[in-house]
Amino acid sequence: MLSLINSINAAVWGAPMLVLLAGTHIFLTVRTRGVQRKLGLALRLSVTREDGANGDMSQFGALATALAATVGTGNIIGVATAIRLGGYGAVLWCWLTGVLGMATKYGEGLLAVRYRRVTSDGTILGGPMLVLERGLNMRWLGCLFALFAMLCSFGIGSSVQANALTSALNGAYGAPTWVTALVTAALAAVVILGGVRSIERVCGVLVPFMAGLYALSCAVILVINHSFLLQSLVLMCKTAFSPSAIGGGAVGGGILIAMRYGVARGLFSNESGLGSAPIAASAARTSEPVRQALVSMTGTFWDTVVICAMTGLTLVSSMLRYPEIAGADAAAMARLAFERALPVGGTLLTVSLAAFVFSTIIGWSYYGERCAEHLFGKRAIVPYKVLYIATAFLGGVASLDLVWAMSDTLNFLMALPNLISLLLLSGVIARETRRYFGKMR
């Protein structure tokens, strides 16, 4: 089964899908006339409340929930994997994917708010499933997206995250996996069973804390490695476009390999095009789709343009300063980079990883709950939450090669209908964008 699913993933996540995702980023950048240049406005809007608007969360709360689910192990281990397999230049391609991916995240957020609906109890329900149903009259495809997203939440959102945490704590401190899994599931239950307000409050506090702690740790290491920073930047830019294999201890085969792994890690890290973040964006208290779309766009900026870039620069400069790091595997590479530079580096990395993992479990629970409600109604919410919390515990004590592989397949099945809606409704995105900024002028 594992061999079969891996073969499927190798096919579906090959060059055609990466070209489709990256091509959508470029296409929407052009259609929105480079909406990335509005980043300053978007950052201001993300911390500004819109009074009198309908929604279940504040705009910042929706952004924090989306970031909670997005910022995770991919920002640390994923970047290290890209460098290990694609070379130093993969960091630059990962960064460029984030810059262009902001347009896709913008488009997803705009459509999610435009086509959301109010349920019978007054809560907001939205996301690609409603976009497909109400924007393209393709309810069947919207239901398929919701099904794939709900199933994916049990894998990439819950079980594999818990497993990453139990493995890290067991390896670093010898903590029993079942104890870590039980504590993780119990803490998650307290937040998840508290409902959307509880998720918003926790994410609103946890996301700035975890991102700030990790970014500060990386900044300190970069100061320590300051004599290698210019060399690192030159090396990343040079090898990103080099036609030949690179050296320095990392494995790589030139521009195509660097592009493949850099683009893939960037796309998986920020989830632009996957269709998950718009589910949170649709719940924001706003009356203007473009306003929330701009706020959503900042999620990709923080996730990839800032955090992944800092991770990549930290790892590359550390590999130049401590050459033995280059020969380590991806997980050890990140740990050694922190431990060599800081006396408490290993602890800081572990705390950051734990916060990333827990926030992802919380954020994805909201995505899965909304999809379950869309498919089966309100009666499905409590059973879904119980099952989701159970998978967090079971995932923490299980071997998850098969779950990881199935999650990759489900990610593909989520992304495909979402990309279809983005491309077919790109005219709506462009028209709403012109209307909003024309009104501002």
Image (cartoon, grey):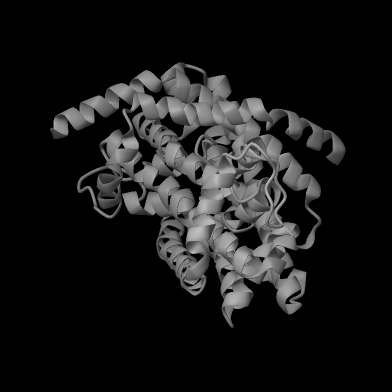
Whether residue 387 is situated above or below residue 93 in the rendered picture? below
Where residue 2 sits, quadrant-wise, is top right
- Residue 339: percent from the left, percent from the top? 63, 76
Q: How many numbered marks does the figure carry?
A: 0
Please, which residue is most extreme toward the left here?
441
- What residue lies at 44% left-to-right and 34% top-to-bottom? 104
Which quadrant of the rendered structure holds the C terminus? top left
Q: Nearer the viewer, residue 237 or 100?
A: 237
Q: Is residue 103 left or right of residue 193?
A: left
Q: Nearer the viewer, residue 314 or 277?
A: 314
Where residue 412 sits, quadrant-wise, is top right
Asked whether the viewer can see residue 69, the reply is no
Whether residue 341 is situated above or below residue 232 in the rendered picture? below
Q: Is residue 361 left or right of residue 131?
A: right
- What residue lies at 57% left-to-right and 20% top-to-bottom? 140
Please, which residue is most extreme toward the bottom here?
343
Q: Nearer the viewer, residue 133 or 415?
A: 415
Q: Nearer the viewer, residue 411 or 141?
A: 411
- Residue 18: percent from the left, percent from the top? 60, 31
Which quadrant of the rendered structure holds the N terminus? top right
- Residue 418: percent from the left, percent from the top? 52, 28
- What residue lies at 48% left-to-right and 41% top-to-bottom? 96
Asked whether the viewer can see residue 434, the reply is yes
Q: Is residue 5 left or right of residue 161?
A: right
- What residue lies at 24% left-to-right and 25% top-to-bottom? 434
